[in-house]
Amino acid sequence: MQRKATLFAALLMRLGLTISPPQACRAADEDPLQDFCVALNANDQQITINGLLCKPAAEVKANDFASQQLRNPGMFSAKLGSAVNLASATTFGALNTQGLSIARIDFKPKGVNPPPCPPSRH
C-alpha cells in the first residue's frame, strides 16, 4: 500500500512539473514601453521618459541615430596624457531611454587613465 502511495505521489509531482511552466520563462524583463525615444532639445511640453523630452516619431530622421561627437579626440590633459570624449542622452539624443553612455579615451605615449577614486582611498 505504501508503494502505491509513493508511486501516486511521484506521478502527481511529475504531472505538476510537466503542466506548470518553468520559472525561467517568467524571469525575463518586461517589454520596453517604446522602441526609441530620441531626446528633443526643446522646452516643449511633452510626455517624458528618463527626464528627457522625446522627439515626435514622425520627426525622427536617420541622422538622429548617428553622431560625429566621438570622431575626434578630446582635449589632452598635460598631466595625464589622456583625453576623454563622453556621449550621453543629453549630447547624443538617440541614447535616450537606452541606459547607455559612450566614452572615447585617447592616450598619448606614456599617458595614463586616471583611477575612478582618489589615490588616498585604498
Image (tube, rainbow, N blue to C red):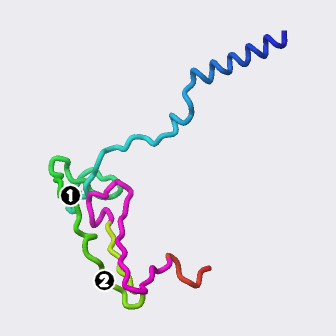
> Which residue in the structure is indicated by mark 2?
75
How many labels, in total? Answer: 2
Q: Residue at x 21, y 53 (%)?
A: 55
> Which residue in the structure is indicated by mark 1?
64
- Secondary structure character of the magenta stretch overall: loop
Q: Residue 94 placed where, x, y %?
A: 27, 57
Q: Residue 96 placed where, x, y %?
A: 31, 57
Q: Is residue 26 left or right of residue 82?
A: right
Residue 88's image quarter? Answer: bottom left
Q: Is residue 43 left or right of residue 50?
A: left
Question: Which SS class for mark 2?
Answer: loop
Q: Nearer the viewer, residue 113 or 54?
A: 113
Q: Report the residue that reaches farthest toward the right.
A: 1
- Looking at the rendered structure, the kind of residue marked 1 is Asp
- Looking at the rendered structure, the kind of residue marked 2 is Met
Mark 1 or 2, nearer chain start = 1
Q: Residue at x 17, y 58 (%)?
A: 63
Q: Residue 120 placed where, x, y %?
A: 58, 84
Above-or-below relation of 118 to 68: below
Residue 106 belongs to magenta span: yes
Magenta region? 88-115
Q: Is residue 39 left or right of residue 112?
A: left
Above-or-below relation of 19 to 101: above
